[in-house]
Amino acid sequence: MPNADLTPYLRDRWSPRVFDPTHELAREDLHLLLEAARWAPSAGNTQRWAFLAGLRGDPTFTEFQTYLSKGNAGWVANVSAVIVVCFQTGAAPEDQETPYLDLAEYDAGQTAAHVTVQAASMGLHVHQFAGFDHQGVAEAFGVPDHWRVATGIGVGRIGDPATSEVHEKDRSGRKPLSEIAYAGTWGTSLG
Ligand SMILES: Cc1cc2nc3c(=O)[nH]c(=O)nc-3n(C[C@H](O)[C@H](O)[C@H](O)COP(=O)(O)O)c2cc1C
């Protein structure tokens, strides 16, 4: 279990596979989630990220669904919105210089973290997923060659497992801090 003293937006965050298919996200709320992403920090404030976003049933969401892996197609169908995080990997034709390009993927990950916290504050759950045909999505949506499609973020209201054919996986645990937080030399626990 997470430390009880964590902010509830992090403590109570987890990635469900059962979402309420009757819940609809208002377009303004999708904008708010993207606004949270927009205000993520980035190296040199380069903001080498962009998003494809759709509400369940709209053309973007429906097209994106066709590229989902078998394991994700069932539960993603019930999320209220999907945000696909993309990041820049190369110079645009007009770019003279591309500072911090090597940090673009790191920065894009922070936008996803911002979305999870903002969503939690709105009573929503988020489940990120990489299981889809990235190349297919890039081609279908005209993502430029110097950009890469990273992950999808499913957002919605948590559903009742009893009403779903999708089964929840056990909530994932975490490595203890002693295994991942070091001081002095690598591998020496912070203590
Ligand atoms: C980059 C990334 C890719 C992921 N891909 C998938 C996926 O394809 N399908 C899935 O069900 N969950 C996916 N997940 C969710 C993780 O399995 C989940 O976050 C992890 O087990 C920790 O669980 P928690 O978020 O409930 O704490 C992904 C998460 C991340 C960050």
Image (spheres, rainbow, N blue to C red):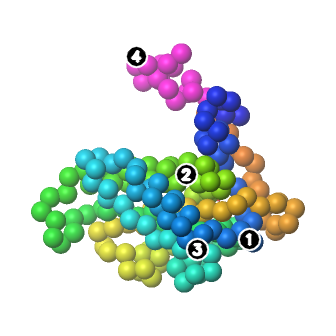
Task: Decide if residue 151 is in sight here.
Answer: no
Label 3 Cα crowd, 10 Å radius (few <14 / some 14-19 / many 20+): many
User: If you read the primary sequence from the N terminus, does the residue marked by circle 3 or circle 2 appear first?
Assistant: 3
Q: Are marks 1 and 3 in contact (CB under 8 Å)?
A: no
Q: Residue furthest left?
A: 96
Query: Secondary structure beneath disc 4?
Result: loop
Q: Residue at x 82, y 60 (%)?
A: 160
> What amino acid is labelled 3 in the image?
Leu
Residue interval drawn in magenta? 176-191
- Percent position (x, y) of residue 17? 71, 60
In which quadrant will I find the C terminus?
A: top right
Q: Is residue 179 left or right of residue 159?
A: left
Q: Nearer the viewer, residue 5 or 150?
A: 5
| Residue at the spot 52% in from the left edge and 54% down from the top edge | 115
C-alpha span from label 2 to label 1 = 21 Å
Q: Which mark is residue 118?
A: 2
* Residue 145 figure quarter: bottom left
Taking the spot 77% from the left edge, 61% from the top edge, the residue there is 159
Residue 100 image point, x, y percent: 25, 50
Q: Above or below — where is 78 with respect to 186?
A: below
